[in-house]
Image: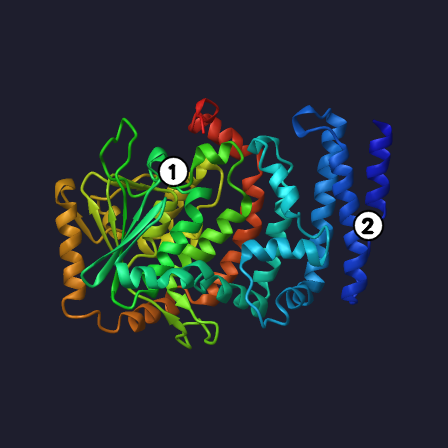
């Protein structure tokens, strides 16, 4: 025990200084961080540690994070330049976070390290993925690097570009967790994860973004409609549900990696709000370098968590009179995506804080709910209402849709404001994701220990 404690103390004392020499600092810090990972790996598994060992692990993690922050404060621009060839190539966040571990070993965890952590319950993880959050936060906090990263995440994925002709020719694409169907001048995306009430998790992330990209790339449609599929849960069997938000069962069992949040909010959700970017055009609203369409959502039953977050990017929302919305961040112990910035635009600061920090439920058919939902109809009339709204939007052509959307955004949420928000979100969500409070909240409010994957 004393040997391990002494080794950690010696390591802390050898903390390298930050200079202005990028390569010198990268080499010195890399050796230091790798030694820190080595010391952490030598300790028993988290739940088996004695108090002294737990304190040693905490010291290793905290010191490592402090030194990474200090290094990145000086060298993030140089690191990002090396990773993107001086911003001549676009790299998505889920690749960038791992590429950084190749450029400067120890700066972020490797794929193998994160894969090993994914085999553990969330409560049993040390939170080495926080290092990814610190790195991405610093990248986004730098105006030039952060804007370039936002641009990368607004580009259509390679899979979408490879499959765009499929929707063009067939008028429909079937995926495991989503489907896209052309209906007149609109395309309808149906989200599905029926066992988990259409919750979002690792199985839905890639396919939902593919569906969004294909819908926006489709040259034969003018509008995108979004709806949840019918589910198989006994309580709601045969009913449509918009979304149950993040899959809390998967979260509790450690199957939601940290990078999932960032990929989702900078990719899927931001594309709904801003459209698709082009590699050769600035996506900032001032320059108009995006291709976008208006979005309509049909909310059946409920839109919880991430489902409610999505509604804040929509141009028009139809809801069943018995549907409701929640952002149960307090009960989950995480930050609800970009809702902290977007929700106050709809319901004001006080109600937004009540919803996010105190769990207030917003029934769609109430004055507060109607601040988010444009039209309330009987549950039995949802199909007809969606068809009618699609027809009304597209019968005369969607006039100046992209221009009007950009005009709203430039005053409400310009790309640079989003970048700054995400810089904070990347860091804070990383700490929330690995907080003991998250596990306590899931066990208290979700009865998580009784749930099965």
**Residue 51 percent location from the top left of the image:** 73, 26
The disc placed on residue 359 is 1
**Residue 285 percent location from the top left of the image:** 40, 72
Q: Residues within 10 Å of mark 1 (few under 14, many from 20)?
A: some
Instruction: Choose mark 2 or mark 1, whichever is in front.
Output: 2
Circle 1: element type: loop
**Residue farthest top in this picture:** 450
Q: How many marks?
A: 2
Examine the rendered structure and indicate whether residue 335 appears above or below residue 275: above
Question: Relative to the observer, which residue lies in front, 272 or 421?
Answer: 272
**Residue 351 shows in this picture:** no
What residue is shown at x 38% (from left), y 60% (from top)? 163
Q: Mark 2 sits on what residue? A: 15
Examine the rendered structure and indicate whether residue 8 appears above or below residue 409: above
**Residue 394 shows in this picture:** yes
Question: Is there a contact, CB below 8 Å, between mark 2 and mark 1?
Answer: no
The disc placed on residue 445 is none
What residue is shown at x 30% (from left), y 60% (from top)? 167
Circle 2: element type: loop
- What distance separates the C-alpha of mark 2 from that of mark 1? 43 Å
What residue is shown at x 21% (from left), y 54% (from top)? 374
Q: Quadrant location of the N terminus?
A: top right
Q: Earlier in the sequence, mark 2 or mark 1?
A: 2
Q: Quadrant location of the C terminus?
A: top left
């Amino acid at each position: 025990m004393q040997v391990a404690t002494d080794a950690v103390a010696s390591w802390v004392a050898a903390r390298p200084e930050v200079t202005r020499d990028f390569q010198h600092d990268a080499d010195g810090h890399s050796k230091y961080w790798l030694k820190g990972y080595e010391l952490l790996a030598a300790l028993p598994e988290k739940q088996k540690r004695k108090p002294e060992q737990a304190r040693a692990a905490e010291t290793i993690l905290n010191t490592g994070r402090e030194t990474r922050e200090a290094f990145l404060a000086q060298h993030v621009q140089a690191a990002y330049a090396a990773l993107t060839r001086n911003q001549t190539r676009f790299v998505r966040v889920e690749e960038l976070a791992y590429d950084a571990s190749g450029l400067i070993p120890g700066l972020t965890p490797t794929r193998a390290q994160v894969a090993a952590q994914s085999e553990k319950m969330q409560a049993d993880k040390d939170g080495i993925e926080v290092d990814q959050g610190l790195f991405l936060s610093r990248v986004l906090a730098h105006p030039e690097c952060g804007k370039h990263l936002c641009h990368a995440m607004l580009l259509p994925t390679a899979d979408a570009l490879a499959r765009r002709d499929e929707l063009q020719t067939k008028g429909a694409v079937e995926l495991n967790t989503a489907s896209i169907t052309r209906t007149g001048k609109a395309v309808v995306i149906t989200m599905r994860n029926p066992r988990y009430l259409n919750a979002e998790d690792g199985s839905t992330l890639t396919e939902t973004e593919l569906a969004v990209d294909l819908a926006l790339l489709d040259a034969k449609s003018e509008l995108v409609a979004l709806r949840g599929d019918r589910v198989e849960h006994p309580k709601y069997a045969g009913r449509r549900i918009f979304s149950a938000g993040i899959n809390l069962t998967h979260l509790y069992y450690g199957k939601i990696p940290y990078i999932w949040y960032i990929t989702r909010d900078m990719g899927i959700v931001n594309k709904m709000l801003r459209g698709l970017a082009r590699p050769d055009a600035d996506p900032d609203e001032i320059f108009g370098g995006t291709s976008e369409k208006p979005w309509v959502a049909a909310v059946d039953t409920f839109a919880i968590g991430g489902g409610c977050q999505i509604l804040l990017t929509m141009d028009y929302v139809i809801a069943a009179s018995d549907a409701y919305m929640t952002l149960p961040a307090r009960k989950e112990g995480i930050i609800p995506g970009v809702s902290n910035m977007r929700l106050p635009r709809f319901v004001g600061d006080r109600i937004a804080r009540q919803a996010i920090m105190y769990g207030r439920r917003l029934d769609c058919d109430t004055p507060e709910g109607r601040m988010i939902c444009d039209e309330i109809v009987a549950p039995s009339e949802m199909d007809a209402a969606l068809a009618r709204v699609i027809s009304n939007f597209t019968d005369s052509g969607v006039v100046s849709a992209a221009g009007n959307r950009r005009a709203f955004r430039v005053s409400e949420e310009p790309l640079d404001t989003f970048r700054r928000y995400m810089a904070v979100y990347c860091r804070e969500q990383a700490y929330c994701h690995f907080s003991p409070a998250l596990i306590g909240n899931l066990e208290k409010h979700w009865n998580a220990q009784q749930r099965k994957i």
